Amino acid sequence: MISLSASKDSRGALDTGTHAGTRSDKRSGKRALIDMPNDLAVRIEDLSITYKINVDTKKTLKNAVMRASKGEKVRMRTVEAVKHMNLDIPHGSVLGIVGANGAGKSTLMRSIAGILPPTEGRIIVNGRISTLLALGVGFNPSLSGRDNIILGGLASGLTKDEIASKTDEIARFADLPDGFIDMPVRTYSSGMYGRVAFAVAVAMTPDILLLDEALSAGDAAFKEKSFLRMRELVQEARTIVIVSHALQTVKDLCTHAIWMHKGEILAKGDAGEITDKYLQFLNVGTLPSNLEDF
Ligand SMILES: Nc1ncnc2c1ncn2[C@@H]1O[C@H](COP(=O)(O)OP(=O)(O)OP(=O)(O)O)[C@@H](O)[C@H]1O
Ligand SMILES: [Mg+2]
């Protein structure tokens, strides 16, 4: 089993990205020489992410002015979505993240992707990331699938030639029916959308692939194809992090897993062991239907 705990081996590694929190580390955005073992893809150090939500029910300008004139402050509610988390993800591992709704899984994924800055602590990423996040950057609905692929390629910094060759490869992999690839994305079913999104994410040959509920929309045939592609990525020693309520997927694909609960890691270890523990916690037993969708 690959250890997820902090390693003492620390040869210096030039990170390709450091997302740092404002309170405990102010080096955000700079490339720096970081103490990080070469065999690690991601190191998460004392990571906390807090959302601040304005809980004023009537958010009118008039109300805001009235409050300000009375010297009242805007009422804010804070949600600690991730709490002081430490985690090392070795290169070439397939990590599953399970846990109840609201446990902080998507928040953690967005933070690893660099979309959401840490409130405290830092994340060091060693490699190129490609993401397929449920709430990540989506496609432009009025453009065709093909044009969205080109835009995605441009955004990932690919050259024109690279994009041209990848576009065909992605379109082939997505394998949409009846010329849908040249139709506006708004006309797609959610499964078709998922197919193109998955095809784009894996075609970028990322070092680190982040998937948040990415496999739930595809049909059985596409799921199998996605699994095979992911196995290939694993064989190429790429790193994959999968958030899923489909526990069978986690069991089948992941080398190890963590169970997140209220922003913390409640358990980590072998994927089968962790999903079983989580199922016991949910008290639902291990009927095949339960494995499919929690
Ligand atoms: N943009 C946001 N603004 C405010 N609070 C948020 C935001 N996104 C998530 N939260 C809160 O942070 C906590 C963690 O949410 P998160 O989406 O990370 O959970 P999750 O484990 O991905 O859940 P699910 O299984 O439902 O996808 C929840 O309490 C949620 O209400
Ligand atoms: Mg989520």
Image (tube, rainbow, N blue to C red):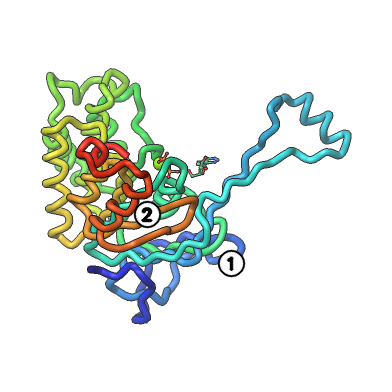
Q: Depth check: 33 or 189 in front?
A: 189
Label located before the other in sequence (1 or 2): 1
Residue 117 versus residue 101 in the image, above or below: below
- Image disc number at residue 24: 1
Q: Is residue 273 left or right of residue 138?
A: left
- Image disc number at residue 259: 2
Residue 199 versus residue 57 in the image, above or below: below
Instruction: Give me the residue at 25% from left, 54% from top.
Output: 206
Residue 102 locus on image (x, y percent): 47, 42
Say what amino acid the circle numbered 2 marks: Trp
Residue 216 locus on image (x, y percent): 26, 35
Q: Depth check: 103 or 135 in front?
A: 103
State which image quarter holds ligand 2.
Answer: top left
Callout count: 2
Q: Secondary structure at mark 2?
A: strand
Q: Quadrant of the C terminus?
A: top left
| Mark toward the viewer: 1 or 2 | 2
- Image disc number at residue 93: none
